[in-house]
Amino acid sequence: MAKARPSQPTADRNLLFGILALQMEFIHRDDLVASMNAWVLDKTKPLGQILCDQGSLGAEEYALLEALIRKHLERHGNDPGKSLAAVNSTGSFPTICKRSPTPTYKPVWLPCRHCCPASHRLPRTIPMPR
Protein backbone atom coordinates (compact mmCIF):
# COMPACT_ATOMS: atom_id res chain seq x y z
CA MET A 1 0.00 0.00 0.00
CA ALA A 2 1.41 3.41 -0.98
CA LYS A 3 1.92 6.01 1.73
CA ALA A 4 -0.24 9.10 1.56
CA ARG A 5 1.65 12.00 0.10
CA PRO A 6 0.54 15.40 1.36
CA SER A 7 -0.03 18.32 -0.92
CA GLN A 8 2.42 21.21 -0.66
CA PRO A 9 -0.22 23.42 1.04
CA THR A 10 -0.70 20.73 3.71
CA ALA A 11 3.03 20.46 4.29
CA ASP A 12 3.37 24.27 4.41
CA ARG A 13 0.49 24.53 6.90
CA ASN A 14 2.09 21.90 9.12
CA LEU A 15 5.41 23.72 9.00
CA LEU A 16 3.64 27.00 9.78
CA PHE A 17 1.94 25.36 12.77
CA GLY A 18 5.24 23.99 14.06
CA ILE A 19 7.15 27.24 13.63
CA LEU A 20 4.48 29.32 15.36
CA ALA A 21 4.18 26.81 18.21
CA LEU A 22 7.95 26.96 18.68
CA GLN A 23 8.18 30.74 18.40
CA MET A 24 5.39 31.18 20.93
CA GLU A 25 7.22 28.75 23.23
CA PHE A 26 4.25 26.39 23.39
CA ILE A 27 6.65 23.56 22.48
CA HIS A 28 10.38 22.91 22.64
CA ARG A 29 12.70 22.27 19.71
CA ASP A 30 12.89 18.57 20.51
CA ASP A 31 9.08 18.36 20.53
CA LEU A 32 8.97 19.86 17.04
CA VAL A 33 11.67 17.53 15.72
CA ALA A 34 9.91 14.46 17.20
CA SER A 35 6.53 15.51 15.82
CA MET A 36 7.95 16.19 12.36
CA ASN A 37 9.58 12.76 12.37
CA ALA A 38 6.23 11.21 13.34
CA TRP A 39 4.45 13.21 10.63
CA VAL A 40 6.87 11.91 8.00
CA LEU A 41 5.77 8.39 8.97
CA ASP A 42 2.03 9.21 9.02
CA LYS A 43 1.18 12.16 6.80
CA THR A 44 -2.56 11.68 7.27
CA LYS A 45 -2.36 13.38 10.70
CA PRO A 46 -1.84 17.14 11.01
CA LEU A 47 1.25 18.19 12.94
CA GLY A 48 -0.86 19.83 15.65
CA GLN A 49 -2.68 16.58 16.33
CA ILE A 50 0.63 14.73 16.55
CA LEU A 51 1.96 17.29 19.04
CA CYS A 52 -1.18 16.80 21.15
CA ASP A 53 -1.00 13.01 20.88
CA GLN A 54 2.63 13.12 22.03
CA GLY A 55 1.66 15.27 25.02
CA SER A 56 3.77 18.21 23.86
CA LEU A 57 0.85 20.56 23.27
CA GLY A 58 -2.26 21.08 25.37
CA ALA A 59 -5.79 21.39 24.02
CA GLU A 60 -6.02 25.11 24.86
CA GLU A 61 -2.70 25.88 23.16
CA TYR A 62 -3.77 23.82 20.14
CA ALA A 63 -7.03 25.80 19.87
CA LEU A 64 -5.17 29.12 20.16
CA LEU A 65 -2.67 28.14 17.46
CA GLU A 66 -5.44 26.90 15.13
CA ALA A 67 -7.29 30.23 15.48
CA LEU A 68 -4.07 32.18 14.92
CA ILE A 69 -3.17 30.13 11.85
CA ARG A 70 -6.69 30.48 10.39
CA LYS A 71 -6.45 34.28 10.72
CA HIS A 72 -2.89 34.36 9.39
CA LEU A 73 -3.88 32.27 6.38
CA GLU A 74 -6.89 34.51 5.77
CA ARG A 75 -4.62 37.57 5.71
CA HIS A 76 -2.45 35.84 3.08
CA GLY A 77 -5.16 34.74 0.68
CA ASN A 78 -5.57 31.32 2.32
CA ASP A 79 -2.27 30.33 0.74
CA PRO A 80 -0.12 28.40 3.25
CA GLY A 81 3.01 29.06 1.18
CA LYS A 82 2.50 32.83 1.32
CA SER A 83 1.61 32.67 4.99
CA LEU A 84 4.71 30.64 5.74
CA ALA A 85 6.89 33.07 3.77
CA ALA A 86 5.49 35.95 5.82
CA VAL A 87 6.55 34.38 9.11
CA ASN A 88 10.06 35.46 9.99
CA SER A 89 11.43 32.28 11.50
CA THR A 90 15.07 33.29 11.25
CA GLY A 91 15.75 32.24 14.84
CA SER A 92 13.90 28.96 14.88
CA PHE A 93 13.69 26.61 11.90
CA PRO A 94 17.23 27.14 10.57
CA THR A 95 18.51 26.59 14.11
CA ILE A 96 16.64 23.31 14.26
CA CYS A 97 18.19 22.21 10.98
CA LYS A 98 21.71 23.07 12.11
CA ARG A 99 21.34 21.26 15.44
CA SER A 100 19.68 18.16 14.08
CA PRO A 101 22.22 15.33 13.83
CA THR A 102 20.70 14.10 10.55
CA PRO A 103 18.70 17.00 9.12
CA THR A 104 15.97 16.15 6.66
CA TYR A 105 15.70 19.73 5.46
CA LYS A 106 18.13 22.50 4.78
CA PRO A 107 17.25 26.19 4.84
CA VAL A 108 17.09 28.05 1.56
CA TRP A 109 17.04 31.83 1.91
CA LEU A 110 14.62 33.69 -0.33
CA PRO A 111 13.50 37.33 -0.25
CA CYS A 112 9.95 37.86 0.97
CA ARG A 113 8.32 40.15 -1.60
CA HIS A 114 5.10 40.40 0.39
CA CYS A 115 6.14 42.23 3.53
CA CYS A 116 9.91 42.70 3.79
CA PRO A 117 12.51 44.91 2.16
CA ALA A 118 14.73 43.11 -0.33
CA SER A 119 17.55 43.07 2.21
CA HIS A 120 15.64 40.70 4.52
CA ARG A 121 15.72 37.00 3.88
CA LEU A 122 13.16 34.47 5.04
CA PRO A 123 13.74 30.72 5.08
CA ARG A 124 11.99 28.14 2.99
CA THR A 125 12.98 24.53 3.23
CA ILE A 126 13.67 21.88 0.66
CA PRO A 127 14.40 18.21 1.23
CA MET A 128 18.12 17.46 1.44
CA PRO A 129 19.43 14.99 -1.12
CA ARG A 130 19.93 11.48 0.19
Image (cartoon, rainbow, N blue to C red):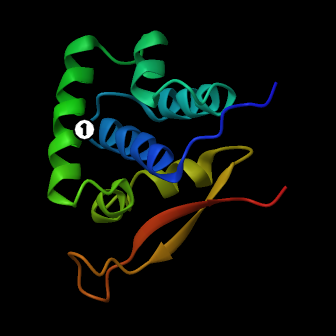
- Residue 19 vs 86, above or below: the answer is above
- Residue 15 vs 106, above or below: the answer is above
Which corner quadrant of the image does residue 42 belong to? top right
Q: Residue at x 23, y 32 (%)?
A: 65
Residue furthest to the front in view is 1
On the rendered structure, is 122 left or right of 1? left
Q: Position of residue 27 (x, y in %)?
A: 37, 28
Q: Secondary structure at mark 1?
A: loop
Which amino acid type is shown beneath numbered disc 1? Met
Q: Residue at x 44, y 40 (%)?
A: 14
Which corner quadrant of the image does residue 6 belong to? top right
On the rendered structure, is 41 left or right of 60? right
Q: Position of residue 53 (x, y in %)?
A: 46, 11
Q: Residue at x 82, y 24 (%)?
A: 1
On the rendered structure, is 126 left or right of 121? right
Q: Nearer the viewer, residue 122 or 91?
A: 122
Q: Position of residue 116 (x, y in %)?
A: 23, 79
Q: Residue at x 58, y 27 (%)?
A: 34
Quick one: quadrant of the C terminus? bottom right
* Circle 1 Cα neighbour tier, 10 Å, few/some/many (<14 / 14–19 / ≥20): few
Q: Which residue is mark 1?
A: 24
Q: Position of residue 57 (x, y in %)?
A: 35, 18
Q: Nearer the viewer, residue 49 or 96?
A: 49
On the rendered structure, is 3 left or right of 21? right
Q: How many marks?
A: 1
